[in-house]
Amino acid sequence: MTVEEINSWLKETHPNDGIKFLGYGSDSHAFRVGEYVYRFPHNDSVLHQYEIEMNLCDAIRKNISVQIPEISVHRDKFNYAKHKMIMGIRWHWHSLALNPIKQMHMADGIAQFFAELHGVNTKKIAAKSERVDYLPFDDIADKISPFLSKHQIRFFGRKYNDIVNKPVAASDMVICHMGVKGSNSVIDNRGNLIGVFDFGNAGKHERWRDLSVVHMGGNKCLYRRVLRKYAKLSGVKIDRKRINDLGAIEHFTHKRWFTDDGQPLNLSDEKIKKYLGKTLCYFYHLPQCFGRVLRIQMTLHKKLA
């Protein structure tokens, strides 16, 4: 299944709609067809994930005040999922930094979305996951060993395992989106959040995972406002350390190192050093700007090993 084959088929079946190739995803090709987005999965397991996403969105829709996708899955010459485009203004973490009123509106909208989503009764929803699939440290050790000393590897492993293996209260296992940011949500011209899409990674996870995405965005004013509003709306005491911990090991989830069928991705040395540098800066209580220094150290270690 090539982009050209899909494009030709879409022109035959939708002759009166404008067709535009939107790009390659990790698991699909995406096209805009009229006012709809069509996603063509690379394999049947991805199509099944679209069905899970469809069912989840249908189950939570009545609890969510912003627009979320109405997905339908189709089996034809090419299998695909489609949903109507949610229109609005794209944003990034710092796009409203110079307009504090709009940024406040956006922060409040993000917090409200999280509070509504996390308040959904998980017992009535077939969520696809109970915990984020962080890699076992033994799987990481072989890949990072060329760049770190034995002492650093032991230190990394101890800190990493403390975070991954920490018990999580049942009340903190909620429905999470797992990635609210500017690439999968839209705002209006006043900064209000009006739509969220791409629920492909959503499921039953630790609530702080959603908040850690905002923290990693790097806009401290926005982040603090989201936390205050979320605490007020949800009645939950914020665990800032846990949010920071989860953000620190974000780069060690299964999907960043392996394909869906378990094959290791061919990560470059630079990418591995980048992942390690960010995490080690947090573990060593260093500013993130020291990541460059750590990467140089890793390069020298590998050359001299």
Image: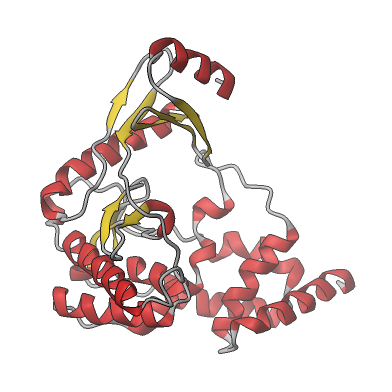
Residue 193's place in the image compared with 165, above or below, is above
Quarter that holds the C terminus: bottom right
Q: Residue at x 36, y 75 (%)?
A: 166
Residue 183's place in the image compared with 231, above or below, is above
| Residue 132 sits in quarter | bottom left
| Residue 168 sits in quarter | bottom left
Residue 80, given in percent of the width and then of the height, sits at: 38, 25
Say left or right for 30 vs 60: right
* One can see residue 156 in this view: yes
* One can see residue 163 in this view: no
Residue 134, given in percent of the width and then of the height, sits at: 46, 61
| Residue 171 sits in quarter | bottom left
Quarter that holds the N terminus: top right
Say left or right for 69 vs 160: left
Q: Residue at x 15, y 74 (%)?
A: 233
Say left or right for 195 vs 253: left
Residue 198, given in percent of the width and then of the height, sits at: 36, 47
